[in-house]
Amino acid sequence: MLNKPLFIASYHQSKFGKLKTMTVPEIVSNAVVGTCTEIDCEPGAIDVGSIASACGFTLNDQGLLSGLMAMVSGLEGKPMESVENACASGGQAVLSVAHKLLLGLGDVGIAVGFEKMRNDEGKMDGKRIGRALGVFSHPDEREGKAYIFPHLFAEVMQLYMDTHGVSEEDLARIAVAEYGHATHNPNAQMSRVDLTLEQATTIEGINRYIVDGLPLKTYDCSQITDGYAGLILATEEGLAKLGVAKQECVELAGFAQATDPIQKEGRDVLRPAGALGAMNTAYEAAGVTPADVTVAEVHDCFTVMGAIGVEVIGKAGYGEGAEFWKECRASVHGDCAVNTSGGLIAKGHPIGATGVAMIGWAAKQLLGQAPTELQRQDAEVAATFNIGGPICASVCTVLKQVA
C-alpha cells in the first residue's frame, strides 16, 4: 500500500494526429492550462510537476522542457523536471509526480507529455523520424536496419509467431479491433478510418511488409503522431485545496517501474522480467489481482505487443495473448476491455504523451466518462502497461474507483 492515497483529479488531452503550426512552447502551455481548466483551478495551485518528451532534442531542437512549463504563470520557481524514458516517458512523468507527492514536496502535481513528430503542414519525414527513434536502441542492434524499431519488433513478432504457433492473421485481428474502438473516440488519430481483416492482411496499397522476410505490415504498426496530454495528481489535502471531491476522482492505487537491458539479444523478450515484475508490484500495492481488472490500456506499439501486453497484465497466460484478442475477450464487453481508446495503433502514439494518455483514458473509464459505445459498465479497477525501447523500460499502474 502507498503511504498516502493519491488521486487523479483532472485529465486533458489534444486530439491526436497533427498539431501543425502549434509551437512547442504553445503545446506545453496548452497542456498545462487545459488540464487545469478541466477542474477550474489556476496553475498556481500546482506544487510540483514533470514533463515528458522523447524527441524534443532530435525533432524539435528543444531541451529544458521544465523551463517551458515554468513559463506558465503560477508555475515559476516550483520543483519541476523533464523526463525521458523513450516511449515510457509519459508514464515516467506520472510516476515522477507521484513520488514527489509521496515525499511531501507538495499536495498537487501535474504530469504533462507531448510529442510533435510532423512538420507545420502535418507531413512527416519517415527517415528522420526513424533516426530519431533509433537512438532508443542498443548501438549493436542498429546495423543493417533502415527502420530500427519496426525491424526489432518485426523480429519479436516472428519469434512470437514461431514460439506460440500464431499467424499473421491472428495478430492482425488486434489492429482491426482497435480501429473499431477508435471510430468512437473523437480524439483518436484514426477515428475516421474503418479497417477490415481483409485489408489488414492483404498486401496492397499502403499495407506492405516493413522488412523483407519478416511478418510486420503497415497495419501492424502504431501511428506517427502529434499530441499532448496532462493530468493532475493530488493527495487528500490537495483535493481539498482544489475544491475537488474524492468521488469525482480516481485513485492511483499502485504503480511501479522497472528497466530491462536495452539490448534485445540475449534475453527473453516474450517474458520481459522487468515488465512482469513491475506489474506484479503495482498489483500488490493496490491490493488487487489481475482477476479484478476489467479495463486496461496496454502499449501496442505493434500488434505483437498488444498480445504480449495482455499477458503482462495477467489477463492471458504466456503465449495466449493473441488468442485472447481473437476470441474477442479484449472487447468492451469481454473479459477485460483492452485499449478501448483505440490503442497506439489507432488512437495514435505521440511518444511523450502516450503513457499519460493511457492512464487518463483508464481514469475516464472508471469515472464512466468514456464514449457510450466504449464504456465498460463494471469498470472499477484498471491497469496500464507503458513501455519504452525494445520492451526495455516498463511503467505499470493500477487505478481504482473511489469508494
Image: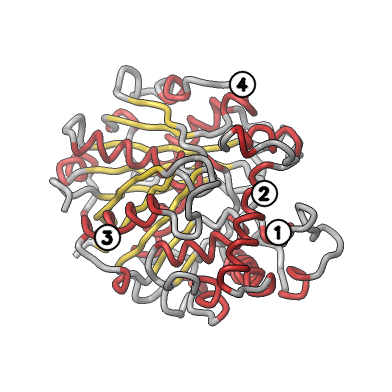
Vertical relation: 302 (above or below) 68: below
Three-letter code for the amino acid on which mark 3 is drawn: Tyr
Residue 46 occupies which quadrant of the picture?
top left
- Residue 235, compared with residue 283, is above or below; it is above
Measure the C-alpha gap from mark 4 to mark 2.
24 Å
x 53%, y 41%: residue:
263
Residue 198 percent location from the top left of the image: 77, 75
Label 2 Cα neighbours within 10 Å, binned few <14 / some 14-19 / many ≥20: many
Residue lying at the far right in this picture: please name it: 205
Proximity of marks 1 and 2: CB atoms separated by less than 8 Å: yes
Earlier in the chain: of badge 2 and badge 3, it is 2
- Measure how far apart labels 2 and 3 are at the Cα level: 31 Å
Q: Position of residue 103 (x, y in %)?
A: 18, 34
Q: Residue furthest front?
A: 266
Q: Residue drawn at (52%, 73%), measured in percent from left and top?
A: 373
Check disc 4 and report the residue beneath it: 61
Q: Helix, strand or loop at disc 1?
A: loop
Looking at the figure, which quarter contains the C terminus? bottom left
Reading the chain from its start, which is encountered first: label 1 or label 2?
2
Q: What residue did someone put label 2 on?
A: 150
Q: Residues within 10 Å of mark 3 (few under 14, many from 20)?
A: many
Distance between mark 1 and mark 2 Cα atoms:
8 Å
Task: Give the crowd class for mark 4: few <14, some 14-19, many >=20 residues within 10 Å.
Answer: few
Mark 4 residue type: Asp
Q: How far, Cα to Cα, is label 1 from label 4?
A: 31 Å
Say which residue label 1 marks.
216
